[in-house]
Image (cartoon, helix red, strand yellow):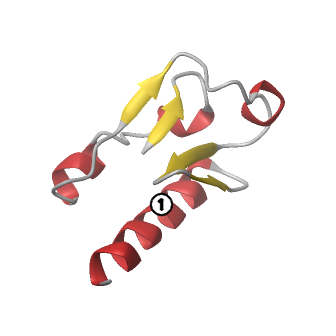
């Protein structure tokens, strides 16, 4: 998972995902060159796919869901 370190999702303890899901890594980057999205919307890249949501909490739930779906496959 990769996120801009100033994106609202970083207000949450996203590093905890590394403990919850072995094999998951969280990379905070200074900029992912999506400034127009980053300024207004919580977003993250999970396995190369951009996920967005209306709030950091909703995005975190969406990230967990995607991780769990991928673990089942």
Q: Position of residue 60 (x, y in %)?
A: 49, 56
Q: Is residue 19 left or right of residue 64?
A: left
Give the residue pinned by disc 1. 63
The front one of 11 and 46 is 46
Q: Residue at x 47, y 60 (%)?
A: 63
**Count of numbered tags:** 1
Q: Position of residue 16 (x, y in %)?
A: 26, 46
Q: Secondary structure at mark 1?
A: helix
Indicate whether 58 appears above or below 19.
Answer: below
Residue at the extreme top of the image, as rendered: 30
Q: Quadrant of the C terminus?
A: bottom left
Residue at the extreme bottom of the image, as rendered: 72
Q: Residue at x 34, y 39 (%)?
A: 26
Indicate whether 32 appears above or below 9.
Answer: above
Indicate whether 65 appears above or below 44.
Answer: below
Determine the image quadrant of residue 43: top right
Indicate whether 15 appears above or below 71.
Answer: above
Q: Residue at x 54, y 40 (%)?
A: 9
Determine the image quadrant of residue 68: bottom left
Q: Is residue 41 left or right of residue 10?
A: right
Q: Is residue 8 left or right of residue 1?
A: right
Q: Quadrant of the N terminus?
A: top left
Q: Residue at x 79, y 36 (%)?
A: 37
Q: Residues within 10 Å of mark 1 (few under 14, many from 20)?
A: many
Q: Position of residue 31 (x, y in %)?
A: 60, 19
């Amino acid at each position: 998972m990769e996120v801009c370190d100033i994106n609202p999702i970083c207000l949450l303890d996203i590093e905890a995902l590394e403990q919850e899901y072995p094999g998951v890594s969280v990379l905070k980057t200074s900029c992912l060159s999506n400034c127009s999205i980053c300024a207004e919307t919580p977003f993250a890249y999970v396995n190369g796919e951009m996920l967005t949501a209306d709030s950091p909490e909703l995005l975190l739930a969406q990230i967990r869901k995607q991780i769990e779906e991928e673990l089942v496959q």
